[in-house]
């Protein structure tokens, strides 16, 4: 039965009018008129909202009255009519099934496998919730291999909007490539936070990424070895309209074989930067800033904020009862961007962001003002601290140099107590850049000894809070917190 036919039945059974339903769900009444006449198939979001509301109303009606003959065929046998939960779930599934079948009837290029015990069909919101759960909670003590075969438009539709996508592995050493696909947009703090948090949690996984266009005809999918594979189909606008969650061992084996056939290196993640605005020489003047590639604004990262400065920031913004342990963790990772005689310090720590968000404060960066002499002194000290890194091809970037930058130079770096990350341009192309990550204890220890020279150089004369919505901020977009498991 078509979706619109079932809608008519449920509206009849629940004693609703389409006008009442549209008002209740805040939809234009003309939408429902088109649905009921079979002229328009709503989006997944509209369907899920409508289905949830109607199934709830239906369960209430059936619970209070005798079973309606019109909908008997949609309910399982031997149904306990005292259970509204079962009723609601049953009719919701019937609505979803009718919707998807209606969709497939309209698009013969897609096939729907009926009565497959290993397959579950879920909508866009469910996909989003599932991905949030997957990225934030390990599936077990073992490392889980995720294979990505999802294009940019799909991820954007899942996470609403994003500018930067960071993928990395916990292995060491590992080259990590950074994806930048929409440099013309800016994040709102609350919009970006969820994505930032999700991808920082990926330290628990060994990840792969691959572009769908490389293997034309293959569906998008997420594969978790020995667990499941999620297949996505896209509509003509590149939006995900259906997701098949498959646990069939045969399908998992086939997926595993397909991944192996791609001959991917386990620790190499790569994708070309797609920047439609970028048509002139990369480092010509301030071009990279003019075109909003502000991820490259930083000449080097790695300065430290002290506890009193953070307390001052918290006090100024009226944040009370701040967890001391969270504050301690926050001190592990700091980022500094030198710009036009000022130094922008970004407090960059997942625990700190969580606390800020709990306090409803859209604050992520602070200006540490320095005069030219102080800045020069800090740069000189940092240069000395970097001398020990030259054998590993990590160098200091001179922010005042006029000549083109060597592609082997890192654009920035930062470190925690246990990890070091350097940001570099990809050696063979100015359209790519990457991170080099190391958690070698001896290497990190030697670097920390060098960086301790910096602590006394960067001191605050005045701290001015900036909201993340302002254009100035950039560094926190391009950094990740590497926390121990």
Image (cartoon, helix red, strand yellow):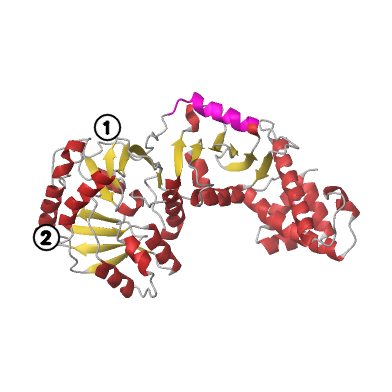
Is 181 left or right of 287, judged from the image as shown?
right
- Mark 1 to mark 2: distance in Å? 33 Å
Between 324 and 464, the one nearer to me in the picture? 324
Identity of the residue drawn at 28% across and 63% down: 366
Q: Secondary structure at mark 1?
A: loop
Is 300 left or right of 57, judged from the image as shown?
left
Q: Residues within 10 Å of mark 1 (few under 14, many from 20)?
A: some
Q: Which residues are magenta?
A: 250-264
Is 252 left or right of 470, judged from the image as shown?
right
Q: Secondary structure at mark 2?
A: helix
- State how many labels appear: 2
Residue 340 visible from this viewpoint: no
Between 97 and 251, the one nearer to me in the picture? 251
Q: Is residue 467 magenta?
A: no
Q: Disc 1 designates what residue?
A: 427
- Which secondary structure dominates the residues rendered in magenta? helix
Measured from the top left, where is residue 418 in percent x and y? 31, 50
> Quadrant of the rendered structure where residue 305 is?
bottom left
Q: Residues within 10 Å of mark 2 (few under 14, many from 20)?
A: some
Residue 331 visible from this viewpoint: yes
Between 325 and 480, the one nearer to me in the picture? 325
Label 1–label 2 contact, CB within 8 A:
no
Q: Disc 2 designates what residue?
A: 374
């Amino acid at each position: 039965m078509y979706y619109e036919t079932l809608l008519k039945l449920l509206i009849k059974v629940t004693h609703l009018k389409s006008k009442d339903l549209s008002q209740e769900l805040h939809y234009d009444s003309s939408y429902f008129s088109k649905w009921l006449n079979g002229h328009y198939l709503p989006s997944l979001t509209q369907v899920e909202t409508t289905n949830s509301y109607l199934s709830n109303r239906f369960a209430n009606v059936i619970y209070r009255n005798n079973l309606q003959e019109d909908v008997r065929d949609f309910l399982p046998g031997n149904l306990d009519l005292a259970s509204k939960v079962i009723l609601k779930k049953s009719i919701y599934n019937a609505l979803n099934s009718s919707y998807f079948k209606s969709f497939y009837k309209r698009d013969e290029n897609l096939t729907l496998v009926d009565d497959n015990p290993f397959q579950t069909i879920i909508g866009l919101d469910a996909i989003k919730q599932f991905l949030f759960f997957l990225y934030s909670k390990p599936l077990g003590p073992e490392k889980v291999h995720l294979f990505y075969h999802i294009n940019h438009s799909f991820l954007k539709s899942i996470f609403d909007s994003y500018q930067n996508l960071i993928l990395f592995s916990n292995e060491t050493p590992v080259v990590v490539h950074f994806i930048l696909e929409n440099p013309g947009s800016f994040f709102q703090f609350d919009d970006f936070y969820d994505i930032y948090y999700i991808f920082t949690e990926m330290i628990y996984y060994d990840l792969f990424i691959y572009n769908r266009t490389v293997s034309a005809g293959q569906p998008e999918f997420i594969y978790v070895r020995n667990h499941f594979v999620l297949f996505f189909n896209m509509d003509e606008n590149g939006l995900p309209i259906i997701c098949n969650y498959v646990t069939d061992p045969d399908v998992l084996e086939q997926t595993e074989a397909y991944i192996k056939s791609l001959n991917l290196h386990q620790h190499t993640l790569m994708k070309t930067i797609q920047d439609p605005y970028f048509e002139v020489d990369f480092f010509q003047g301030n071009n990279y800033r003019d075109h909003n590639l502000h991820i490259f604004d930083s000449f080097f990262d790695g300065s430290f904020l002290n506890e009193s400065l953070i307390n001052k920031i918290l006090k100024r913004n009226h944040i009370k009862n701040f967890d001391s342990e969270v504050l301690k963790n926050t001190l592990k990772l700091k980022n500094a961007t030198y710009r036009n005689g000022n130094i922008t310090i970004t407090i960059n720590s997942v625990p700190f962001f969580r606390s800020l968000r709990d306090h409803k404060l859209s604050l992520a960066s602070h200006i540490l003002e320095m005069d030219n002499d102080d800045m020069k002194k800090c740069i000189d000290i940092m240069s000395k601290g970097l001398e020990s890194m030259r054998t590993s091809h990590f160098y200091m970037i001179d922010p005042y140099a006029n000549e083109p930058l060597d592609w082997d130079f890192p654009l920035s770096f930062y470190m925690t107590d246990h990890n070091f990350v350097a940001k570099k341009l990809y050696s063979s192309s100015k359209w790519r850049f990457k991170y080099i990550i190391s958690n070698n204890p001896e290497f990190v220890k030697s670097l920390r000894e060098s960086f301790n020279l910096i602590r006394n150089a960067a001191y605050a004369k005045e701290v001015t809070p900036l909201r993340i919505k302002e254009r100035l901020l950039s560094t926190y977009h391009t950094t990740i917190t590497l926390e121990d498991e």
